[in-house]
Image (cartoon, grey):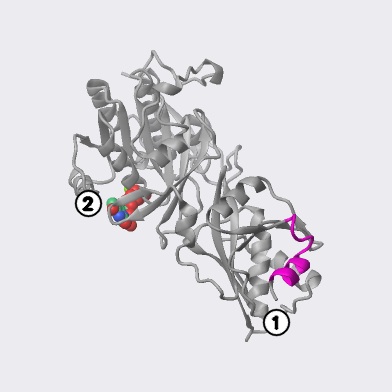
Amino acid sequence: MAKIKSQFICQQCGYSQSQWAGRCPSCNEWNTMVETVVSARSSQISPKSPITPISLKDIKVDENKRQKTGELELDNVLGGGLVEGMVVLVAGEPGIGKSTLLLQVALKCKDVLYICGEESASQVALRAKRLGKISEVSLLETNNVDEAIAKIQEIKPKVVIVDSIQSLVTTDLTGGAGSVGQVRECAQRLASSIKDLGSSIFIVGQVTKDGNIAGPRVLEHLVDTVLWFEGDRSSNLRLVRAIKNRFGATDEVGVFEMSEVGLIGVSDPSKLLLAERVTKVPGSVVSVILEGRRPLLVEIQALTTLSQLSISRRVAIGIDANRLQMLVAILIRRADLHLGDQDIFVNVTGGIKLADRGVDLAICMAIASSFLNKPMPEDVSAVGEVGLMGEVRKVSGLDKRIKEAKKLGYRVASAESGKSVSSAITKLLH
Ligand code: TYD
Ligand code: MG
């Protein structure tokens, strides 16, 4: 009989110890330590390849040996394609497109084993039909990770796709599917099972509302690459960002558009984002952001109306609400705009969320443009961080931004052209 050993694992952060505690010593959350039975067998599953950290300098990467996934945007994010033994975690909210993208990969690559724990094989087949292509893909319908691993060892596929890690369990643990212990153990076993074969594996991880990869962030340490799926479900645009990548840069972003026939890579996202822009209307300003290393043109819209409430509202969609409050205060004090009694709404079209401070000037210009009822010149985009003194500051990668703007016929009003927000308003909105 295998020796049974129990561990108390924090359901919040994945910290484990052999004794119970009311409060997790690691994340200080209360009542999160849950007893999980760990069978000694689990550590013997692959005695030849214990999971140990690998030194980066020992990993030999032959750039030419990278296997293409068939999706150019995805290959770029991965750093040029898949590397032998690569473990990729694909995380994102439910319904964002993870299964769709990976099924597309399965249909385009050779030698793929698709482990579907979440959907039935017939559901996957239906989706494949919708994507318009049926090819040789081995589907394995199971919730048992050890069964799945046995199959992987048997048929030795080049690429393994697991959808999703939260649906798999090992009977060596007592916890339910999706619990921290199960998710971690299953991912660990899968990762070590493919390392020996020289295959690569995509593991889908569901993300909870608050943005954590359901329960265990521990998965992030265990994999080579973490791809984060972003996008608003009401819009078709999807960004795939590498937030960790042992085999490439982490500032790569892949852009996709969700269509009737699946996810389509977008090589020119700026054009897509500005496709529906209405020009010569007050309140619309184009800015150039840097998503990783990639410049993107986005449209910032603002609307100001006289408030009917005693406290006027500032509503920010796609930008940080505090930043909007700050920029409004700067406009009031430094540009002499009487916005105190105005409700102010700011929206970034395309459903993308902006963290780049280079959009400050565009936000200010959009608000001023709506308030003064004067449209921005059609061919001008605004780039620059705005400081509390009302000064426009330089941003990184200005050359790249100017180049991208030029491609679509925009000039860039930036730190070079205006010294302060108020002078930019006087210069551009008259
Ligand atoms: P899905 O890949 O199932 O999301 P996840 O695996 O991340 O939970 O994506 C499902 C959504 O994508 C669903 O709302 C329908 C939409 N969709 C399309 O718009 N077009 C398509 O061709 C497919 C397959 C899905
Ligand atoms: Mg799915």
| Amino acid type, callout 1 | Asp
Secondary structure beneath dot 1 equals: loop
**10 Å neighbourhood of mark 1: few (<14), some, or many (≥20)?**
some
Q: Is residue 119 left or right of residue 374?
A: left
Q: Quadrant of residue 366?
A: bottom right
For the residue carrying disc 2, how many other residues have a C-alpha within 10 Å: few (<14), some (14-19), or many (20+)? few
What residue does disc 1 label? 341
Span of residues in magenta? 415-428
The residue most toward the bottom is 308
Q: Is mark 2 within 8 Å of ligand 1?
A: yes
Give the residue displayed 39% in from the left and 27% down from the top.
191
Q: Nearer the viewer, mark 1 or mark 2?
A: 2
Task: Give the x, y percent position of residue 306.
Answer: 64, 84
Tell me which residue sits at (72%, 64%) in the image. 326
Q: Is residue 389 visible?
A: yes
Residue 31: x and y, percent? 53, 46
Please name the amino acid that badge 2 sits on. Answer: Arg
Read off the residue under disc 2. 130
